[in-house]
Image (cartoon, coloured by chain):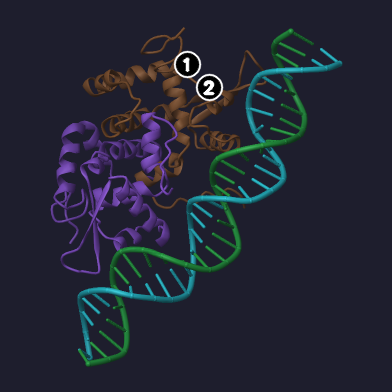
Chain colours: A purple, B brown, C green, D cyan
Amino acid sequence: MKHTYQRRSDCPINFSLEVFGDPWSLLIIRDIVYFGKKTYGEFLASEEGMATNILASRLARLEQRGILLKRPSEKDRRKEEYALTEKGLDLIPIMVEMANWSAEHDPETGAPADWIALMKADREHMIQLMRETVKSGSGVFVGEKSLVGHIG
Amino acid sequence: MKHTYQRRSDCPINFSLEVFGDPWSLLIIRDIVYFGKKTYGEFLASEEGMATNILASRLARLEQRGILLKRPSEKDRRKEEYALTEKGLDLIPIMVEMANWSAEHDPETGAPADWIALMKADREHMIQLMRETVKSGSGVFVGEKSLVGHIG
DNA sequence: TTAGATTACTGGCGATTCACAAGTGAAAAG
DNA sequence: CTTTTCACTTGTGAATCGCCAGTAATCTAA
């Protein structure tokens, strides 16, 4: 019998860890939420440099766990596009807290201070805005409808 | 040169993952925060059943990363007691969000519904209470000064 | 039309990490 | 003393990991 998924416990912290408790999964979610990435190649190009087999296995697992949805790109039929489900969008508050924690405790953090301040000052509203931004297909920092501004 | 710690990036999400982005570290933090556990033997007895070598390596790593403080027990000189630093206590909001997410998306969750409701209704205040409870040496659910009630 | 990129993967390989079992030395308990 | 408890360490195989080299399908330019 394959893929008989045996959970370690019913603890909610443990449940989270079994879905995204590894060093890579949340980076994919981050790429979607903050940078508006959608495709295998875009994820692969992230500065953390994940290996191709790890990326492929994590994408498959996150899809199987109901965090990601995969569908063929309309513009380029070689490409697959990955998007967050509602369950995946609900991870945004967790990432926000992780970003706040790192901004506080990492002296070399790349987190923009004004963004972190904004997240702390108006948490609920900003999370709602982030969710809508990601749902529209943009990233919080990068994309046509990004929250923070444009690059090009 | 040993232990030359090479970070993958300055991204705050990545920073968090490099500190506690594995399937076990947060379970130790959970044991301290929610169940008031302090010693190697108590962590080892958790229902997820971590291996002895993994537990030892995670305790050492969390201490090295400034999340845990280790000191000899006063009552039993064979024992070491582990406690959260301020940096470690600051992880509480992250765990709260993980618990909320799992309570929402895990049909078999063991999270008490009334506790989750309380956390959502009065988040900031409850997090403050949790922090004080843990600082006093109790767990949120278990211990002399526990937030929720007593067992014995 | 065709040669060359690009894209999303898969497979091989050695190294690391993992789970599991069995020890170790120190201290406490009887 | 002897036994038990405690916090680890060590050893062993299995699984997973990081890196590299493909590959089939599709797009792109000449």
Residue at the extreme front: A1
**Who comes first in sequence, dot 2 or dot 1?**
2
Given the image, on which type of amino acid does mark 1 rest?
Answer: Gly
The image quadrant that residue D3 belongs to is: top right
Which residue does the numbered mark 1 point to in the structure image?
Answer: B137
* SS at mark 2 in the image: loop
Question: Residue at 32% of width from left, 36% of height from top?
Answer: A100
Give the percent coordinates (x, y) of residue B151. 44, 9
Chain letter for the residue marked with disc 1 in the picture: B
Q: Position of residue B143 (x, y in %)?
A: 46, 13
> Crowding at label 1, few (<14), some or many (≥20) Cα neighbours within 10 Å?
some
Q: How many marks?
A: 2
Real-space Cα separation, disc 2 to disc 1, in angstroms = 9 Å
* Depth check, front residue: B33 or C18: C18
- What is the three-letter code of the residue carrying label 2? Lys
- Between B10 and B116, the one nearer to me in the picture: B116
Where does residue A55 sit, x and y in percent of width and height? Answer: 38, 57
In the rendered view, tell whether residue B75 sits above or below residue A68: above
Q: Nearer the viewer, residue A114 or B139?
A: B139
Residue B86 appears at what percent x and percent y? Answer: 43, 27
Which label was assigned to residue B38? 2
Q: Quadrant of the C terminus of chain A?
A: bottom left
Q: Is residue A109 visible?
A: yes
Q: Is residue A142 left or right of residue B47?
A: left
